[in-house]
Amino acid sequence: MVKCNDGNSRRVILVRHGCVAERYHGICYGSSDIELSDEGHRQTCALAAGLSALDITHLFHSGLARARLLAEMLAGTTGLEPVCVPALREINFGHWELRSWEDIFAEVGEAMAGLIQAPATFRPPAGETAYELRDRVLDWYGQLPREGTIVAVAHGGPIAALRGSLADIPVAEWPALVPAYGEWVELDESRKTDG
């Protein structure tokens, strides 16, 4: 268990939802509310069984169905009321949502790399920047209780943005911090400082 600077102990566990339905493979779905595949449902059940063994004190989810399902399962075994936090949603790709990555690339080419090359300013049309994603997740993180076992069911982008920000990792390296579908990571808060 990681010790925070004030002497209280907490664990922050970030869970990525299970696999999405096959028809969304190769599709930019971002913050769209899409469903899990059969494999994703199996992963969710396995996650629920494993995580319910922890002494969870706080339970959060993004509100999107693919994350909410696990939170509801955990609520059933822990008795906790899951809290919907839209800040945990995947990045909003705006007009790119539900289009194939191939079509997007055909339209904008290498410009799509702006999400990691210009994270403060590049946004898909009607979408958000990588730093806007980072800021909303960091705001949520900054308001967490200082002790307990906190589980948040979220998405690859927010998880990577939080992990990368806390470890001072450049945005270009955030994609490597995305856990696989149906996996969870525990935050290393040892580098976190107050103030």
Image (cartoon, rainbow, N blue to C red):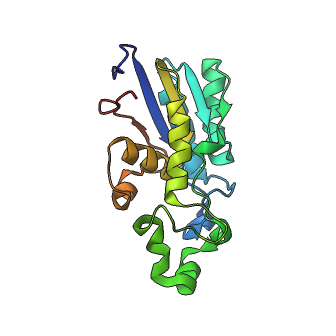
**In this rendering, would 168 be left or right of 104?**
left
User: Where's residue 170, x and y in %?
Assistant: 33, 56
Q: Tag count in the figure?
A: 0
For the point 48% across and 18% down, which residue is it?
Answer: 148
Residue at image x 49%, y 51%? 156
With 97 as the anchor, is 12 left or right in this view? left
Up-down: is 12 above or below 184? above
Q: Is residue 186 above or below residue 75?
A: below
159, 50: nearer the viewer: 159
Using the rendered view, name the quadrant where residue 10 is placed: top left
Image quarter in which the C terminus is found? top left
Q: Position of residue 35 (x, y in %)?
A: 67, 53
State the residue in front, 182 or 100. 100
Q: Residue at x 61, y 43 (%)?
A: 87
Q: Position of residue 177 (x, y in %)?
A: 37, 51
Rendered view: 134 above or below 21? above
Name the residue at the front extreme: 195
Residue in front for this viewpoint, 80 or 182: 80
